[in-house]
Image: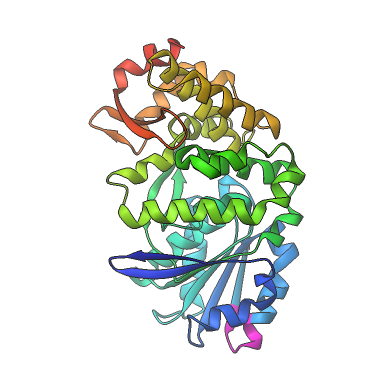
């Protein structure tokens, strides 16, 4: 278990195999009896919605469900409106709550739903994908996409509880599991030490599953430590965006052909190559980072990186401050830093590697 202690909120991230068999008791520990909306997607719902609903009803919760399509296109205004309308139609009050049962997309959408309905109602994350378990379910970021801009509309809104059970990962397709592992590699690069050494031993899907508990615990512990020092990304929380500036841009430009983690993997390599040329990152680190991604079948390059439309997309990056991008470099494992780069210099920077 990891405790996230912030100035206005403290909550627990419970991590253990078998937690999904005891959901009702876990939630009863933080919430009184109330109306709850479980938001999920079609795939996750097919596996886990019935058992989750039954457990909550057994403990006296009045449950409404909302099953949405899977994929990044669900993180949009029409689905946010649909969720909020359902809450209003079912007469949810500020004493009720929203539960995200799913991966990063559902977590983001459900979190923003809870944050905006009646200016904020209670929220719990049940993370079922590796991406959500190691990254997006912790830290309170909620957002949706608008047009060709990713995560542009959102807020920081912390959950009351995060439930992580590695057994959920067994029903993930190989591609969906491995794309989440990109976020693990990212975090291990930022953390360095034993965590970086551990990802150096992972060479297959089976290795990811066999080491899932340790990988999740180390990822959450590192992210919680960063978030507790910088809840709203004014400083060191920006480190967590390693690979995301280019990654977010090409993810949207790929129109669904790239998963989030695949785009982040490409983004980490693309930016690190540039920093090696600029004598900021070590060539040794780049080689080791590439190997960790290649070993599990993650992509490390895309033609989209080298297009003008990708450069144009960087204008919408949330780390753009008055035309200055705040890029994340990793000099060596465990040594991240922020490099400020004017937008008008990015073309030469990208083409220089």
Residue at left 45%, top 21%? 282
Which sits in the foreground, 265 or 121? 265
Farthest left residue in view = 322
Numbered-mark total: 0
Q: Is residue 315 left or right of residue 187?
A: left
- Name the image colouring: rainbow
Q: Is residue 205 left or right of residue 163?
A: right
Residue at left 50%, top 16%? 306
Q: Is residue 111 above or below residue 185?
A: below
Percent across and percent down for residue 89 are 50, 76
Residue at left 63%, top 27%? 291
Percent across and percent down for residue 252 are 52, 34
Instruction: Choose top left, top right, bottom left or bottom right for residue 152.
Output: top left
Percent across and percent down for residue 208 are 69, 46
Q: Is residue 129 above or below residue 334?
A: below
Instruction: Choose top left, top right, bottom left or bottom right for residue 235.
Output: top left
User: Is residue 15 something one can see in this rendering?
Assistant: yes
Which sits in the foreground, 260 or 282? 282
Q: Is residue 17 above or below residue 286?
A: below
Tell me if residue 52 is in the magenta stretch.
no
User: Is residue 105 something one can see in this rendering?
Assistant: no
Percent across and percent down for residue 41 are 64, 58
Magenta segment, which residues?
Answer: 56-63
Which sits in the foreground, 346 or 120? 346
Q: Is residue 236 above or below residue 51?
A: above
């Amino acid at each position: 278990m990891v405790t996230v202690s912030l100035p206005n909120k403290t909550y627990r991230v419970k991590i253990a195999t078998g937690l999904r068999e005891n959901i009702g008791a876990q939630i009863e520990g933080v919430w009184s009896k109330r109306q709850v909306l479980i938001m999920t997607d079609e795939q996750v719902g097919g596996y886990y919605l019935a058992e989750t609903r039954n457990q909550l009803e057994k403990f006296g919760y009045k449950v409404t469900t909302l099953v949405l399509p899977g994929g990044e296109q669900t993180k949009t205004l029409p689905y946010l409106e649909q969720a909020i309308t359902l809450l209003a139609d079912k007469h949810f009050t500020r004493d009720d709550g929203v539960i995200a049962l799913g991966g990063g997309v559902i977590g983001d959408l459900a979190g923003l739903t809870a944050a905006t309905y009646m200016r904020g109602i209670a929220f719990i994350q049940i993370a079922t994908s590796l991406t959500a378990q190691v990254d997006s379910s912790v830290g309170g970021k909620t957002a949706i996409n608008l047009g060709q801009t990713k995560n542009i509309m959102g807020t920081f809104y912390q959950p009351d509880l995060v439930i992580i059970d590695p057994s959920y990962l067994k029903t993930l397709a190989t591609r969906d599991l491995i794309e989440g592992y990109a976020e693990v590699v990212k975090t291990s690069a930022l953390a360095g030490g034993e965590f970086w050494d551990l990802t150096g031993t992972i060479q297959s899907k089976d290795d990811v599953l066999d080491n899932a508990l340790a990988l999740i615990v180390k990822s959450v512990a590192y992210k919680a430590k960063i978030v507790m020092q910088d809840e709203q990304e004014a400083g060191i929380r920006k480190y967590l965006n390693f690979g995301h500036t280019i990654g977010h841009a090409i993810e949207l430009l790929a129109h669904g052909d790239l998963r989030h983690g695949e785009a982040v993997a490409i983004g980490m390599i693309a930016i690190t190559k540039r920093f090696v040329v600029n004598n900021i990152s070590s060539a040794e680190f780049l080689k080791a980072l590439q190997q960790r991604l290649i070993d599990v079948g993650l992509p490390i390059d895309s033609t989209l990186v080298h297009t003008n439309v990708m450069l144009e997309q960087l204008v919408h990056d949330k780390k753009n401050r008055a035309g200055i991008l705040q890029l994340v470099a990793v000099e060596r494992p465990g040594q991240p830093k922020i490099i400020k780069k004017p937008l008008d210099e990015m073309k030469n920077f990208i083409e220089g590697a």
